[in-house]
Image: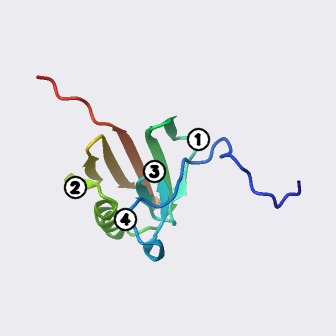
Amino acid sequence: MGCSTPPIEPQPGQPVTGPAPEGTAAGAEVGRVYLDDVRVPSELNYDADESIVYEAPKFKAGVMHFSKWRLDVPSLIGFFMDHMVQDKWTFVNAFRGKEAYLSFSKPDKTCTIRITETWTGTVKVTIAVGPLGEKKN
């Protein structure tokens, strides 16, 4: 095998990515998809050293960290607000101020997106996806 042979299995430290979620037109794909159904702008850089991903045969969850220098925060918020709903997430709520928190849910899981900007101009995005807890009666 030569150097141009692509790896067959994901390599350590690479994010868990997959095909676009169902219902998304192939020509309309924007960004990269993580944990099966969380779309992230291609401009953001994945930080494998700060991230943790749990993967089971039927479920993926984790806390992923991304960053990019000089990224427009309102546009980034708009990206997530638009694409999460397009990818069948239900908008739950948002807190906006010095930091932004966006919450979404699906029948079996939740997603919280935290967006911050450092004084040096680096925008940091933390995406946490986890199972939805059962209601107590």
* Residue on which the image places disc 4: 23
Earlier sequence position, callout 4 versus callout 1? 4
Q: Can you tell which of label 4 and label 1 is closer to the viewer? A: 4
Tell me: residue 29, above or below residue 117: below
The percent coordinates of residue 60 (x first, y second) are 45, 40
Earlier sequence position, callout 2 versus callout 4? 4
The percent coordinates of residue 68 (x first, y second) are 50, 61
The percent coordinates of residue 87 (x first, y second) are 34, 60
Earlier sequence position, callout 2 versus callout 3? 3
Quadrant showing the N terminus: bottom right
* Residue on which the image places disc 2: 91
Q: Can you tell which of label 3 and label 4 is closer to the viewer? A: 4
Count of numbered badges drawn on the protein: 4
> Of the residues shown, which amino acid type is indicated by label 4?
Gly
* Residue on which the image places disc 3: 36
Q: Can you tell which of label 2 and label 1 is closer to the viewer? A: 2
Question: Whole-Å distance between the Cαs marked 2 and 4?
Answer: 18 Å
> Of the residues shown, which amino acid type is indicated by label 2?
Phe
The answer to which quarter of the image holds residue 21 is bottom left
Residue that appears at 51% across and 65% down: 42
Is 42 in front, or is 96?
42
Q: Give the left or right position of residue 44, taking residue 23 as reference.
A: right
Earlier sequence position, callout 2 versus callout 1? 1
Question: Whole-Å distance between the Cαs marked 2 and 1?
Answer: 29 Å
Residue that sits furthest to the bottom in the current view: 27
* Residue on which the image places disc 1: 49
Question: Whole-Å distance between the Cαs marked 4 and 1?
Answer: 32 Å
